[in-house]
Amino acid sequence: MGNWKPYVYQEDVSNRLLAGKSLVLQAPTGAGKTTAALLPFIHGWRADTGCEFSTKCIYVVPMRVLANQFVYEWEERIASMGRRFRQNLEVRIQTGDRPEDRRFEGDLIFCTIDQALSSFLTMPYSLPRRQANLNAGALAGAYLVFDEFHLLDPASTLSTTLYAIKQLRQLAPVLLMTATFSQSMLETLAKEIGAEPYLVSADEAHTIATRDGKEANRRIWRTEEELLSAQAVLDKHRSRSLVLCNTVQRAQKVYRELRKLGRERGIETMLLHGRFLPEDRRSLEERLRDEFGKASERKGSLIAVATQTIEVGVDISCENLHTELAPASALIQRAGRCARYPGEEGTVIVYPVERYSPYGRENKDKPENENAWVQEMKAALEWLRGHNGRALDFAGEQELVDAVATPRDRRILEGLAADAPDRAHRIHAVLLGEQGGQASRYLVRDADSRTALIHPNPDELLVNPYGAKGFSLPVNTLRGMTREWLERELAEEPDWRVQTLLEDLDAEAEENRTRYAWKPLYDAKLVGAVQVVVVHPALAGYLPDEGFVSDVGETGFNSTTDSLTQAATGDGYSYRVETYEQHIRHVLAAFEQIALPELRYPAAALERAAGWREDSLIEMAWLVCLLHDVGKLSEGWQAWAHFYQKAIGKPAPSSTALAHTDREWDNEVHRAGEKQTRKKHPKPRHAAEGAIAVSGILASALGQNEMAVRAGLTAVARHHAPFVADCTAFALSSDARQHVEATLKYVPQAVQDTIRLDRLRDYPRLVPTGFANTLIHPSQELGWVAYTLLARALRWADQAGTARGTRGDLEE
């Protein structure tokens, strides 16, 4: 960061985090909270500091625009530091509209709360269900930053996040940040997660506001009695105005009116919300920064209309900010885009609303039973009316929050305490695979999004529907759109209107490819139970200046897919025949080069937290990678593999133990061979069976550490089907021990010394009973975290090793 000097609070926050403390930080908008959050991570990353800190940072935000903004700001800063210190740190983003790190492989990852929580809950929105347990381990041991924490829905997202934080903070510090908590909320949340509250003082806030010797910025707050309209905006416009609406539909409506009226006065207009294609959205965000940013020359006249997408974190400033009524915390965040920089003066105009969506519904008959957000919005409007024309600084904004948000915050805190046992039970059920739309809505809800695609022939997208170009929409929004699509009258009726994606959800399936199909949807209530829907282009479309439009069809846009996203989701793999020894060698090499570096810090942290022997989890990781496919050495699996190779005209020597067969998904000969083999030799399962076979080896290697053994067994059992809880009878081939012994040379000598091959076991006649009881349970918190780390390391190494085998890497 060159000669840049941090603010006093930034340095203090960094030092506390480096000392292992978790914090709840409250600082004014524009005070550099993100820099405060990333300072300790950068110190730990730099080899010359000698700091021991997590090697992965997952920076969680409530909205996609924040992730986009931070990536834009930090990619170049990190790259510059990398060149200076000759170290490489990879910055990535993972959001619904920019799923560029679906498996959380980056070092510094900016992601949205739905991506983080769905990964923690082993139902990642970014991956097919068969890879559900791949991402949870990425959060374990990572330095977690939750920005703009006040925006999380208290009835769902907030409670689930607190559950995750209390578990994960045992391995690494956690930082929660906001500008707008009430004092009671700040202190109670800190106590709840075992963190320290940290409130930037009014004096330091003033020092930051007057940096560079300039006068403090000044915002005048005003209220209006009429609804927000294009004419009201134009009447007060000078050169740069921002208009913030509560919903996309309202923003599109106001934009259309402003575009028409503004054109007559030579005023340009632009629209930004969360439903643009990534390339258009990036272009719009760049223009917004250029026109409203600190370095803008402010030439011409421009009005930008937006939703909550620019409510927080975006470093822009305007003269007049027009906003629909929102909760006090949201209003203050929006005001942070007005007169943001020292010496500036601006006006924030707050307008009443006809409907309180998306925050809740008004209950005129029983206002005491209204949604807490709605009650706060009404209280905020009354408070602002009583202070109309007042300039609010950080202390004044805190006065507003404390006055109108404290009652809601108290109700939230009471609800969190009452809800905790039921929430833990539901989270455990989801982690065990008892998943459904209801669970997703209950645990993630407001952050819960689904993908909408547009295509007249959606079968063309089935090769990789998760990678198709589409739009991430909140479930409730998509449900309302679907209802309108199903009811709308059309001049010419299409063959279908809306369809949902069906996935192969067979927990026993051990294929490396998900099978998909489309199913017509006739009831909008069912939207929450699926991840992807496709709508006919006669009903919805896309316009470059308005984004996704649910009320306009035949725009010429169709969703498409590509090979890059196909690889990222793990679909579309092809294989070539590979011996057991070759495959294990590839997997162990991939583990050492790819998975082990990420695993080292969280493994050591977990060993300390659980009181386990040093390097015991690393040892277990070597073992599960070494032994994960022992189940393929069964008589049944080898018979299937050899019969299939013969059926496709490429028989393998009978003495060869196979780990993979030749398989190209679009090869007709291979399809015919698969069909023929299925009749004679149905493909046996191997993952859970392999776990049983090696359970004695794992137990003898880890001594008395029963929890680590359970975690390892569970990782092996679920390295294909992430929720399997049963096992079939199997018999190992007579030379199974010989084939396993041939692979021992690929693990460190210290690991070899713990292995007792005489502990291999099989069940040739009886199905093992009580198998589920040998697996780890989510209630065994640190054991469950160990499982997620091992499952991630194994699946990552297995996928990379399989790809290497397909390419023929490491062949002698």
Image: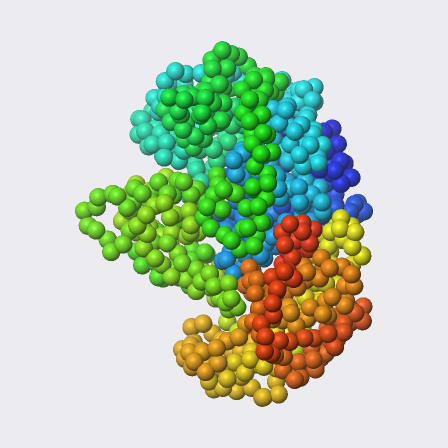
Above or below, comparing residue 424 to residue 151 in the picture: below
In the picture, measured across the screen, residue 472 lies left or right of residue 261, that is right
Residue shown at 74% from the left, 28% from the top: 8
**Residue 411 visible to an observer of this rendering:** yes
In the picture, measured across the screen, residue 455 lies left or right of residue 154, that is left
| Residue 83 horizontal/vertical position (percent) | 69, 49
Front-lying residue, 588 or 635: 635
| Residue 785 horizontal/vertical position (percent) | 66, 52
Locate the C terminus and report the quarter of the image it occupies: bottom right
Residue at the extreme left of the image, as rendered:
491
Q: How is the image coloured?
A: rainbow
Residue shown at 56% from the left, 17% from the top: 403
| Residue 590 horizontal/vertical position (percent) | 66, 66
Above or below, comparing residue 791 to residue 148 in the picture: below
In the picture, measured across the screen, residue 674 lies left or right of residue 77, that is left
Residue shown at 46% from the left, 61% from the top: 505
**How many numbered badges does the structure rendering display?**
0
Above or below, comparing residue 674 to residue 222 in the picture: below
Above or below, comparing residue 198 to residue 452 in the picture: above
Locate the N terminus and report the quarter of the image it occupies: top right
Front-lying residue, 76 or 454: 454
Residue shown at 57% from the left, 62% from the top: 725
**Residue 100 visible to an observer of this rendering:** no
| Residue 75 horizontal/vertical position (percent) | 61, 45
Front-lying residue, 633 or 58: 633
Front-lying residue, 377 or 578: 377
